[in-house]
Amino acid sequence: MSLNTEQEQVSAFLTYLQMERQASSYTVANYAKDIEHFFAFFSEQGRETPLDQISYTDIRQYLRSLNENEYARKSVARKLSALRSFWNFLQREHAVRDNPFRFVSTPKAEQRLPVFFYEDEMRAVIEGIDQTTDLGKRNLAIVELLYAAGIRVSELTGITVEDLDLAIGTLLVSGKGRKERYVPVGSFALDALENYLESARPNLASKAAEQNDQLFLNYRGGPLTDRGVRKVLNAAVEDAALKSRISPHVIRHTFATHMLNEGADLRTVQELLGHKGLSATQIYTHVTKDRLREVYRNSHPRA
């Protein structure tokens, strides 16, 4: 492969991520931004450094700039991961001789406990949704499904009508790396989904110029996007008069935390969340331990 310009090299790398690595569109977009940010750093300094001449010293200068601009460790780690992968690709394609990023250590991630809703807060979000309109019925089905299945927002927006089996209460989910898994769906979510499919989705679908099989539709009848889901959740929290911040991942954290609090084993929760290994799921055990200590302190007479 002949990669003569930086633009061609970046384009080839992003195609490689999509086709060979089967990375999600979210990952590809973020990697593209991270690489562009690295190039912009040198451009702002008035330097036009060829990629095969980038050195360890150059990278340290870039990291120092990130630190001065107070980038979070997680953001720095992701940028390094994107750039290291990019240079590995360039080395594989013989566009550069060496990968200077192999000498750079990745900062340790900050151990932040996931934010989640307590049961009464989650109930307030659900009960505050107006169920008298087509969009309200859709919104209730979205929140109930996120809470019932613990799926990611990218997984939610990728669901088709055929992926949902109301009869046996299961959902086929396409996760990271296009790995598929079946997840059970609780009775409350099934009721909300059935109501949406029967009395709301047909009305929304009729507004579209072209029909599609996506489960969740926007007000024009087109596929609902990640951004659309976030708007739905923000409105639900405002209607519930909660001060907490919300995102699809907060509901995912809530699902995992409530499952473990009620006695589910870690391996089961790992499978339901679609995590590759237990390490990504174990952070929720810290939350449940904190919850146990709180209950103990509030309940034991000699705590």
Image: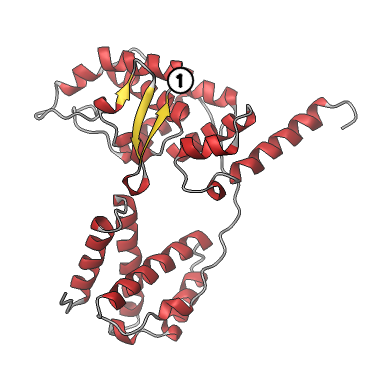
Q: Percent position (x, y) of residue 211? A: 13, 27
Q: Is residue 225 visible?
A: yes
Q: Is residue 84 left or right of residue 47?
A: right
Image quarter of residue 297: top right
Image point (22%, 33%), residue name: 223
Q: In the depicted view, which residue is nearer to us: 270 or 212? A: 270
Residue 48: x %, y % from top left: 28, 84
197 to the left or right of 124: left
**Residue 31, position in %: x, y?**
33, 61
Q: Quadrant of the N terminus?
A: bottom left
Position of residue 133 in the picture relative to residue 291 (left or right):
left
Return the x and y of residue 102 as percentages of the image width and height: 44, 77
Residue 209's image quarter?
top left
Camera sees residue 244: no
The three-letter code of the residue at mark 1 reads Gly
What colour scheme has been applied to the protein in the rendered image? secondary structure
Quadrant of residue 145 in the image?
A: top left
Residue found at the far left of this picture = 209
The residue under label 1 is 186
Q: Secondary structure at mark 1?
A: loop
